[in-house]
Amino acid sequence: MIALLNLPKPSDDLLSTIIQHIDTLQINNDAKKYYDHTQNGNINCSEGQIFLLPRSIYISVLKEFYPYIKNRFDASIGIFKNTNATKLSYLPPHIDSTRTLTLNYIINEGGENTLTTMYKMCSPKLTKAHDIQMIPYENLEVEFSVKTVKGNWYVTDVQNYHSVDNIETQRFILSISFNDINYSYFKNKYSNLIVNEWLPYVGSNHGHFD
């Protein structure tokens, strides 16, 4: 599931520091090779990687957001790049291996129609790619898709299969993540932070606001 949150934006100083840090990061291209392998070479997969923030930046995130989120959390940067200017790119359907829930601040969307897609749950044989578990698109049934907008926070159940589709350029996100709480726990404890929640219609591929 996905919900829009009313968390404040990172301060200008923090956001500037994060963007400067992004410029220093190099993606390990082995990740794209794994992604391509899981999709049998049928789509243009993004280069992508999650980077834990250095302690100095993490402390700044902690100072700004612990007043709102009282559970212990990690903080990281997600970078997803399209390396083929002639095609859209995709981060294929996956569940996170170590993270149970993420709060994602969209620094850069990556395109005009970049979508986060959620899928109906299943238990197929998985292919592990670093810290995530991927399967081919054709093995899943879409539940709904959401356009996550620059400058907003979203909570995402990353133990549900999800993908990021239609990346034109580069997608950057700041993630506050947890490895010991799930979506239901967050929804109950932090209901004051949830603005709108996307839920699947039964028998439909289109989500709706709760």
Image (tube, helix red, strand yellow):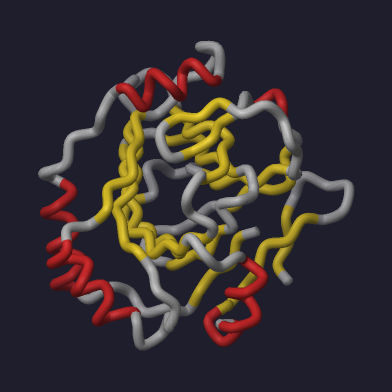
Q: Which corner quadrant of the image does residue 10 belong to?
A: bottom left
* Residue 185 position in % (x across, y down): 63, 74
Determine whether 179 is above or below 128 in the image: below
Which quarter of the figure has residue 13? bottom left
Residue at left offset 88%, top offset 47%: 203
Position of the C terminus, as image quadrant, is bottom right
> Is residue 121 placed above or below 100 in the rendered structure?
above
The residue depicted at 67 percent of the width and 70 percent of the height is 184
The residue nearer to you, when weighing 161 against 4, is: 161
Farthest residue toward the right?
Answer: 203
Classify the position of the N terminus by image quarter: bottom right
Seen from the viewer's position, the closer of residues 58 and 88 is 58
Percent position of residue 144, x then y:
70, 48
Whether residue 99 is situated above or below residue 120 in the rendered picture: below
Q: Is residue 102 left or right of residue 197?
A: left
**Residue shown at the point (37%, 43%) measured from the top left:** 110
Identity of the residue drawn at 22% across and 57% down: 53
Between residues 82 and 51, which one lies in front from this camera angle? 51
